[in-house]
Image (cartoon, rainbow, N blue to C red):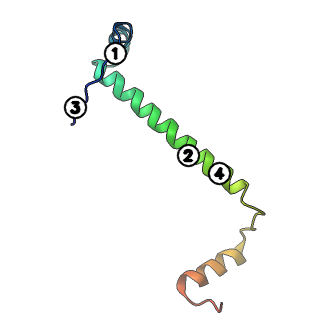
Amino acid sequence: MATMNISLPDSLKHFVQERASSSDYSNPSDYIRALIRADKLRAAEERLEQALLEGLNSGPSVPVDTAFWERLNQRASGTDKC
């Protein structure tokens, strides 16, 4: 595991230590790792939301029915006549 040193003002250092000791975290590093994981998840959710919005704004929808899947399978297998 890699090590990263950060500088915190005393007030934040005390807050982190307090949160780590008053929660299920074994030490301040565990608390910080949990915060980073939560932020990473939030960023992934934001990217997903952005992709969904882009899809909604990309134009008219295409019906996904049996014919759609048959055309897609033909394209994927190289048997389409396009």
Mark 2 residue element: helix
Left of 47 or right of it: where is 60?
A: right
Q: Please state which amino acid type lies under the numbered disc 4.
A: Leu
Q: Which residue is drawn at 34% across and 15% down?
A: 8
Q: Earlier in the sequence, mark 4 or mark 3?
A: 3
- Disc 3 to disc 1, how far (Cα)? 16 Å
Q: Please state which amino acid type lies under the numbered disc 1.
A: Leu
Residue closest to the far right: 60
The answer to whether marks 4 and 3 mark residues whose Cβ atoms lie closer than 8 Å is no
Q: Name the residue under label 3.
A: 3
Q: Please state which amino acid type lies under the numbered disc 2.
A: Arg
Mark 3 residue element: loop
Q: Quadrant of the N terminus?
A: top left
Q: Which of marks 2 and 3 is nearer the N terminus?
A: 3
Q: Which of marks 4 and 3 is in front?
A: 3
Q: In this view, does 59 lie above or below 21?
A: below
Q: Which of marks 1 and 4 is nearer the N terminus?
A: 1
Crowd class of label 2 (few under 14; some 14 to 19; many from 20; radius 10 Å): few
Q: Mark 4 points at which residue?
A: 52
Q: Mark 1 points at which residue?
A: 8
Q: Please state which amino acid type lies under the numbered disc 3.
A: Thr
Q: Which numbered disc covers residue 64?
A: none
Residue 80 placement: quadrant: bottom right
Q: Which of marks 1 and 2 is in front?
A: 1
Q: Name the residue under label 2.
A: 47
Residue closest to the far bottom: 81
